[in-house]
Image: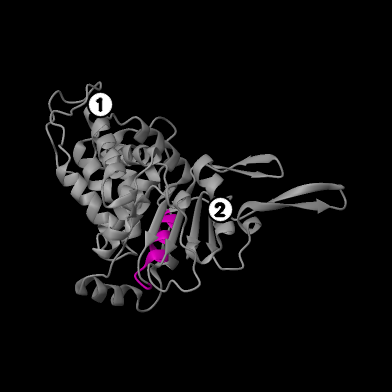
Amino acid sequence: MTTYDEHVSLGELTTTADDVRRSVESVIEGKPEAVRLSLTVLLAEGHLLIEDVPGVGKTMLAKALARSIDCTVRRIQFTPDLLPSDITGVSVYDQQRQDFEFKPGAIFAQIVLGDEINRASPKTQSALLESMEERQVTIDGQTYPLPDPFMVVATQNPVEMEGTYPLPEAQRDRFMARVSIGYPSPAAELEMLDVHGGASPLDDLQPVAHAHDIVKLVEAVRGVHVSDPVRRYAVELVSATRTHPDLRLGASPRATLHLLRAARAAAALSSREFALPDDVQALAVHVLAHRLLPTAQAQLNRRTPEQVVAEIVQRTPVPTGAGPAAPGAPPDHGRQQPRGY
């Protein structure tokens, strides 16, 4: 485990990110795309929604990412009787001091794991809105900042919806990306039986990076150059969701910002100091689809938001010569294919 006291170079970023990726992949078998997307969201200062059927490793992925970093971690099991104060904290009267003392809730951690987030009531879910967007909590008129880095990783099942509360649009819009892990391949499932058969590999997982490292990596990602053509391309993709006939709710300006930040992180993870249109393309479905609401006719036709975003990506012209004029960048890099997600 290494720490950096000065500005992190692109090589150091890639090395540390690879260490974290390998650590998580030692627990999650055969899902490199999901692991890479999780790391991209972390470095892009976003929050991740993991949505899939039970038993495919949603909580395992979140725990493995948290344990691979030496930082504060809190897990919240969302249930119907969970209260907002259980998440944000509460002011308690101290008899000796004759004054109120603030007791921080579970949200005061650097990585917060929200398991089965849709099982809590909308009132409790709304306790996350301020913290996820502004990275602070306001209790009794007093504002408390959250630690840095700060990331919420939430899970939910798309099936078994009885007694659950669907996430409202304002809540889903605060998640930078949504990932579905999916079932493993037969080979990966067989390997899982060997690795997980005796004991959980989480028990032996050791941190490979400090929270201070992640802060430095985030600062390095902010310096990744995004040219004007790439920015316009991201805006065109998001704008197309607002006028598509199969959608009654398109993506917000926050989605455009999240798409740009995620593209920066993806470029950095690919050892590039500049983002390409391919980075935006590869992330568009993950960043945009969960924010969209299809029309009733689209639902009857079994048209999913993922299909709509993929169609928009296909028909939106890709800018050519979108290379940066950033210092130290190659004069004509052309288009490179990014790693898959």
Which residue lies at the image location 22% right of the left edge and 44% below the top edge? 281
N-terminal label among 2 and 1: 2
Image position of 315 with respect to 300: above or below: above
Residue 297 is tagged as none
Report which residue position mark 1 lands on.
228
Q: Is residue 76 visible?
A: yes
Mark number, residue 126? 2
Query: What distance separates the C-alpha of mark 2 from that of mark 1?
Result: 36 Å
Q: Residue furthest front?
A: 297
Dividing the picture into quadrants, the one containing residue 268 is top left
Q: Which of these two is toward me, 4 or 146?
A: 146
Q: Is residue 54 left or right of residue 322?
A: right
What segment is highlighted magenta in the picture? Answer: 54-68
Q: Secondary structure at mark 2?
A: helix
Does 299 appear above or below 320? below
Q: Amino acid at mark 1?
A: Asp
Residue 193 within the segment the image draws in magenta:
no
For the stretch drawn in magenta, what is the main secondary structure? helix
* Image position, residue 148 (x, y; %): 51, 41
Q: Secondary structure at mark 1?
A: helix
